[in-house]
Amino acid sequence: MSMSTPGPERNPSSVKVDKTSGQGKPPANGAKPSPRPGGAKPGGAKSGGKGRKTVAPVKVNSGRSWGPIAVVGAVIVIALGIIGFGVYATVQGSKAWEDKAADIKGIVNYRAQKNPQIDARDHKKGPQTYVTNPPVGGAHNSAWQNCMGDVYTEPIANEHAVHSLEHGAVWVTYKQGLGADQVAELADKVKGKDYLLMSPMANLDKNVSLQAWGYQLKVDSASDPRIDEFVKALRLNASMEPGAPCSGGNTTTGPVADATNGTNMNK
């Protein structure tokens, strides 16, 4: 039996691999190669040395900008205000003057009472007796008091003033002895404005009383905004004789002539 002779034993070649950096070259000056980010080896293996900890990115939430929102909100509010005012003005403008008068707080509508003494419109000579003080209607003198923005500093005859109301004037009266500043403020509302007249009145229970035919408003101050509201709603509108003049009337003050003896009491 023959046996084969074993050949020479093969020893595997060993290759010494030195540490390298870059393109397989050894690091310069013997420096150690830089570790991978986070100290992790390829394949996700942990490094045996102390590697850098991975820092999670911080998410920054940008704050909401309130500036543009505030501007838009302000524009919307202004727009709604303009629209609302337009609607209000349209509604107010479409109202009948009687409804505007009824909206004035404190106004008294004597027309609604259907009182014959107030509704009477006949011309009579001499002094007349009236239901209200100042009067808002009733029989009156054939001559009206001039009412082209006239400001009388002395009391005028009721009988002439009522005729002016019939023509559509608003008669502004004030308590005798009212402060000069109040009187001046009232005068500014009357001077030079047609179908308005003004005079002092004795025994008023309020400082200021306004009259149109069948309507009356009494207030405590010349600054009361209802005065302007009354004038705006009733001047000319409350006329019982639309188109009748306010010029060419009586301009004297004092009571009318006594019809019994014909004595002229006008000043």
Image (tube, rainbow, N blue to C red):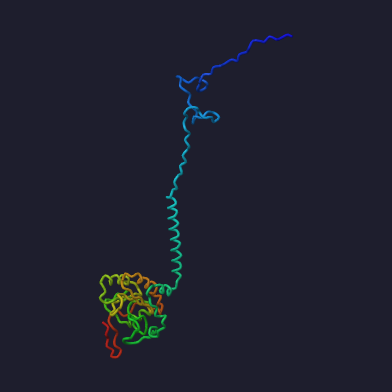
Q: Is residue 94 visible?
A: yes
Q: Residue at x 46, y 19 (%)?
A: 30
Image x and y of residue 112, in percent: 42, 80
**The N terminus lies in which quarter of the figure?**
top right
Image x and y of residue 153, in percent: 27, 76
- Quarter of the image where one finds residue 159: bottom left
**How many numbered discs sit on the rendered protein?**
0
**The C terminus lies in which quarter of the figure?**
bottom left
- Quarter of the image where one finds residue 255: bottom left
Camera-side residue: 125 or 199?
A: 199
Q: Is residue 105 placed above or below 35 in the rendered structure? A: below
Q: Is residue 144 visible?
A: no
Q: Residue at x 33, y 74 (%)?
A: 219
Image x and y of residue 41, in percent: 52, 28
Camera-side residue: 61 or 93?
A: 61
Left or right, 68 with reference to 155 = right
